[in-house]
Amino acid sequence: MQSRLAGVALQLAALATFVAMDTIIKLLTEGFPVVQVMWARFFFGVLTVTLAMKLITGQVPWRSRAPGLQTLRSLTLAFCNLLFTTALVHIPLADATAVGFASPLLTIALAAVWLKEPVGWRRWVGVGIGLLGVVVLLRPPFIFGAAPVHWAMLLPLGTAALFAVYQILTRKLAGVDDPRTTILHTSFAASLVTSATLPFDWVWPSAGGWGALAMLGVLGGLGHGLLVLAYARAPASLLAPMSYTQMIWAVLAGVLVFGDVPDLLTLVGMAVIAAGGVLVALPDRTRR
């Protein structure tokens, strides 16, 4: 029981860490180009993970049996973050986070089609409910009769689709490479691609700016480390539904840092997405 509670606490801490990282990203985009912020996240992320792995395991297993697939996975993550970071320039953090949570639902659909994984009808119902919540957030005028939301609300939807592809690629690599190799390659190609763009769009940071940019890599590495510890102490069936509490952290950060108070329709959309996601995540024995 104590192990499960520790797992839950670690999961919640990881989600809060990711929201803190997204909050810093949104703040940094007010003074730095989007690509420079992305570069910092990936570059300092690679440094953080490499150093941590060397200190903890004594090894840094870079060699991959599928370098092409690792590169494709890393570049998919890069474009995923490009869309999400661009969205944060224009829309509230909570809105972007909520729409992005369509990703687990799309992953289920892709796994059924691409990996031929069996998906029961109850999970398909959960996918449908979750996507209905996304529709509520996007508020198409032909349904709600109101002015359309900002165009940037579509960007997290693209993020969700790309992250679903990223998850499928991660599963395909699970039986090919050491998990540590996949972790090391996660940001490597993305850091190289974003580094190539820096001469064309660069703002020289102050000392504090460098610290904030470096913090992105530290928070990203810390968040993923906390997730690994959480899943080592508690079952995925308990932790997966709790990932939707990240929307609560995002709402709090949006209100406290940016003064973005979500309206009722946004909260309803978030609740519907979370309901669909929990239905998808519940183990089969719970729904019999």
Image (tube, rainbow, N blue to C red):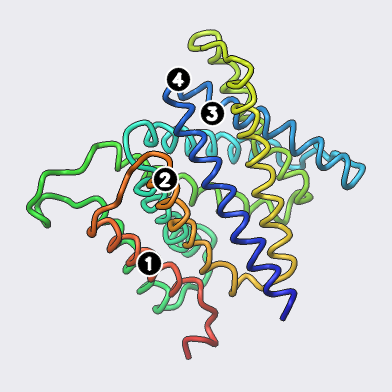
Q: Quadrant of residue 127?
A: bottom left
Picture coordinates of residue 167, whole percent (x, y): 56, 52
Lateral position of residue 221 relative to residue 112, left or right: right
Give me the residue at 62% from left, 61% from top: 11
Q: Which of marks 2 and 4 is in front?
A: 2
Whether the residues at callouts 2 and 3 have beta carbons within 8 Å, the answer is no
Residue reaching furthest to the top: 199
Judging by the rendered image, the residue that carries numbered circle 2 is 256
Q: In which quarter of the image is residue 227?
A: bottom right
Q: What residue type is labelled 2?
A: Leu
- Please tell me which of labels 3 and 1 falls first in the chain: 3
Judging from the image, what secondary structure is the residue with disc 4 in? Answer: loop
Judging from the image, what secondary structure is the residue with disc 2 in? Answer: helix
Lateral position of residue 153 relative to residue 173, left or right: left
Judging from the image, what secondary structure is the residue with disc 1 in? Answer: helix
- Disc sitting over residue 38 in the figure: 3
Judging by the rendered image, the residue that carries numbered circle 1 is 127
Q: Nearer the viewer, mark 4 or mark 1?
A: 4
- Label 4: few (<14), some (14–19) or many (≥20) C-alpha neighbours in 10 Å: few
- Disc sitting over residue 284 in the figure: none
- Please tell me which of labels 4 and 3 falls first in the chain: 4
Residue reaching furthest to the right: 58
Picture coordinates of residue 278, whole percent (x, y): 45, 71
- Please tell me which of labels 4 and 1 falls first in the chain: 4
Q: Which amino acid does label 4 sit on?
A: Gly
Q: Nearer the viewer, mark 4 or mark 3?
A: 4
Q: Tell me the quarter of the image containing the N terminus.
A: bottom right
Reply above or below: 142 against 285: above
